[in-house]
């Protein structure tokens, strides 16, 4: 059982499970809760402290489950509430905590509230739970403004009676009205519902979007874009001041529990605004995606780490580090593209869009750099958020036929963005056999097609290979647990612009050579014990190119 430590989250290694693509217990090609339960021993061996479970709620999957029909139930294709309880019990028995994703900005259009809103007249209490507004123009057929959704196209959908509803994401994801007391109360009920079932924390989807100001006149899309980065709390859609009040109510619920429930905000805000979400009176922690967007290089990595340590200092929160998740091109592939490509993932998305030509990639280099970056990340003070499959060094799957694609980003941005399916392909567990062991024996079903090359990244292929990425992650997570001390880091001089080094309390020292060729180990490091290395060739005097070493 996890202990009563209130601070367990501060430096936890949190492993994100995208439930439909992790493990399939019944062979229908869709990962499910029993599948995850059956793999708890794998998570124990890997050495993670917590699992973050992406949405598993009933959903039509218009957005991979981020379109929730019912916040207090399990999608029947994924299991039942009893299966959920069994999963939590199995994780807890193994000392692993459980964080669930909560999606408060929008429900799905199949949620009973939204169906009621559609069946009710304009001005009704049912419509007030969402953001309905009258159409413009003589016959009210024009949307209330020219705002666009994050997945492309208008952010307003007509409902046939002269009104439109706002959806910042897919049209199947109507935005809730957080000015409505009933909406607020219902989410408090949901937080208690899962907390009572033993959930240890929450990952809060688009946490910066809940509060909105839709008073007229509505400003134009161009004006809003220009104001987006102001970070002054006055933008009508993002990062508004009223969020503090909403999350203070959530915090009061978290604190009803012992240990208090935790939360991490997904808030795409200016770095200096993150602390609002991460405050102990608010959600407690916020994702920092800066490393994920940084180019692979000593200068950019150092700048990101230093800035974030500074931003977090004195906030009461801890740092968060991320290289991959279910929304971005996997880092083994981002780093396999040419040098200028890792920045912001834009080049990676272009590469996917152009058909993912393997000739543009250097996969060995991608994996080498991914391993070096991961070992760098795993030594930083704060929480490490890992995405399923990165421990296998799994690359992005580019070769998904259009007919098999699922992501609304693809459908609403034809020819502009292929979307996020390539990082959501079911995991390979065995090198041979149907669906690479994703399902039970004999099953060949997989809701997204797995490429043949998955075989060499299978858990079964890597498990007993001491040089594999999986073995590196296992060793790193084990050492991290034992070496982890105060949340401090001290930079150490290396004498080389390509080589970064830092020391954690207790003498744990990390050296990363971001350059392509071997660099001499700094004099102070020569002769130290090598605890772990991301690449094979560490001699006593030098560190190989694009390699991280942990020393003591
Ligand atoms: C962020 C989630 O990570 C992403 O997958 C989803 O599409 C949007 N929020 C909308 O819920
Ligand atoms: Ca299944």
Image (spheres, rainbow, N blue to C red):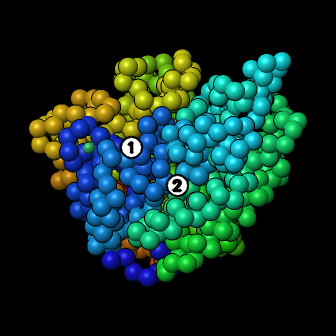
Q: Is tag 2's residue or tag 1's residue first in the polypeptide sequence? A: 2
- Answer left or right for 153 relative to 103: right
User: Residue 18 or 456: which is nearer the viewer?
Assistant: 18
Total numbered badges shown on the rendered structure: 2
- Which image quarter is the N terminus in? bottom left
Residue at disc 1, CB closer than 8 Å to ligand 1: no
Q: Which residue is identified by label 2?
A: 102
- Residue in the image at 76% along x and 58% along y: 242
- Answer left or right for 243 relative to 435: right
- Residue in the image at 51% along x and 78% along y: 257
Q: Which residue is identified by label 1?
A: 368
Q: Is residue 33 above or below residue 107?
A: below
Q: Nearer the viewer, mark 2 or mark 1?
A: 2
> x and y percent of residue 266 in the render?
59, 52
Mark linked to residue 541: none
Residue at disc 2, CB closer than 8 Å to ligand 1: no
- Which image quarter is the C terminus in? bottom left
> What is the C-alpha distance between the residues marked 2 and 1?
35 Å
Instruction: Give the residue furthest to the right.
Output: 217
User: Residue 418 or 38: which is nearer the viewer?
Assistant: 38
- Answer left or right for 15 relative to 26: right
- Residue in the image at 43% along x and 19% along y: 355
Residue 319 in view in this figure? no
Secondary structure of the residue carrying numbered label 1: helix
Q: Are marks 2 and 1 in contact (CB under 8 Å)?
A: no
> x and y percent of residue 330 in the render?
44, 40
> x and y percent of residue 103 in the render?
55, 51
Q: Is residue 205 above or below residue 402?
A: below
């Amino acid at each position: 059982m996890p202990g009563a430590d209130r601070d367990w989250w501060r430096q936890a290694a949190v492993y994100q499970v995208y439930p439909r693509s992790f493990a399939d217990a019944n062979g229908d090609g869709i990962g499910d809760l029993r599948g995850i339960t059956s793999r708890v021993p794998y998570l124990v061996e890997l050495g993670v402290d917590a699992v973050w479970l992406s949405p598993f709620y009933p959903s039509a999957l218009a957005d991979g489950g981020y379109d929730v029909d019912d916040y207090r139930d399990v999608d029947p294709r994924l299991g039942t509430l009893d299966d959920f309880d069994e999963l939590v019990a199995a994780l807890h028995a193994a000392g692993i905590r459980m964080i669930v994703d909560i999606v408060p900005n929008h429900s799905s259009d199949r949620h009973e509230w939204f169906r009621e809103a559609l069946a009710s007249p304009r001005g009704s209490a049912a419509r007030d739970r969402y953001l309905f507004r009258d159409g413009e123009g003589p016959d009210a057929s024009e949307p209330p403004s020219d705002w666009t959704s994050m997945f492309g196209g208008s952010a307003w959908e007509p409902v046939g009676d002269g009104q439109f509803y706002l959806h910042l994401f897919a049209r199947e994801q109507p935005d809730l009205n957080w000015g409505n007391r009933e909406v607020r109360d219902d989410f408090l009920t949901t937080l208690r519902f899962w907390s009572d079932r033993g959930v240890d924390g929450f990952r809060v989807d688009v946490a910066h979007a809940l509060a909105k100001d839709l008073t007229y006149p509505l400003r134009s899309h161009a004006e809003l874009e220009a104001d987006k980065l102001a970070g002054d709390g006055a933008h009508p859609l993002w990062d508004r001041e009223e969020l503090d009040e909403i999350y203070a109510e959530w915090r009061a619920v978290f604190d009803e529990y012992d240990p208090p429930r935790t939360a991490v905000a997904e808030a795409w805000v200016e770095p200096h605004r993150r602390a609002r979400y991460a405050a102990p009176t608010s959600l407690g922690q916020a994702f920092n995606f800066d490393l994920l967007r940084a180019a692979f290089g000593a200068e950019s990595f150092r700048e990101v780490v230093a800035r974030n340590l500074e931003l977090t200092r004195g906030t009461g929160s801890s740092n968060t580090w991320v290289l991959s998740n279910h929304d971005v091109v996997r880092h083994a592939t981002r780093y396999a593209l040419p040098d200028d490509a890792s920045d912001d993932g834009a080049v990676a998305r272009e590469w996917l869009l152009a058909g993912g030509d393997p000739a543009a990639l250097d996969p060995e280099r991608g994996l080498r750099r991914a391993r070096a970056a991961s070992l760098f990340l795993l030594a930083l003070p704060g929480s490490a958020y890992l995405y399923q499959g990165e421990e296998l060094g799994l690359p992005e799957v580019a070769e998904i036929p259009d007919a098999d694609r699922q992501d609304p980003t693809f459908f609403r941005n034809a020819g502009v963005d292929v979307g996020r399916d390539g990082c959501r392909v079911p995991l390979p567990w065995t090198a041979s056999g149907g669906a690479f062991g994703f399902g039970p024996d004999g099953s060949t079903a997989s809701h997204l097609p797995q490429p043949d090359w998955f075989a060499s990244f299978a858990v079964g292929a890597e498990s007993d290979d001491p040089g594999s990425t999986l073995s590196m992650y296992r060793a790193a997570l084990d050492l991290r647990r034992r070496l982890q001390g105060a949340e401090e880091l001290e930079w150490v001089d290396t004498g080389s612009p390509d080589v970064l080094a830092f020391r954690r309390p207790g003498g744990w020292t990390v050296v990363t050579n971001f350059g392509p060729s071997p660099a001499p180990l700094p004099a102070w490091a020569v002769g130290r014990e090598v605890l772990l290395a991301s690449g094979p060739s560490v001699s006593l005097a030098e560190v190989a190119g694009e390699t991280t070493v942990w020393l003591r």
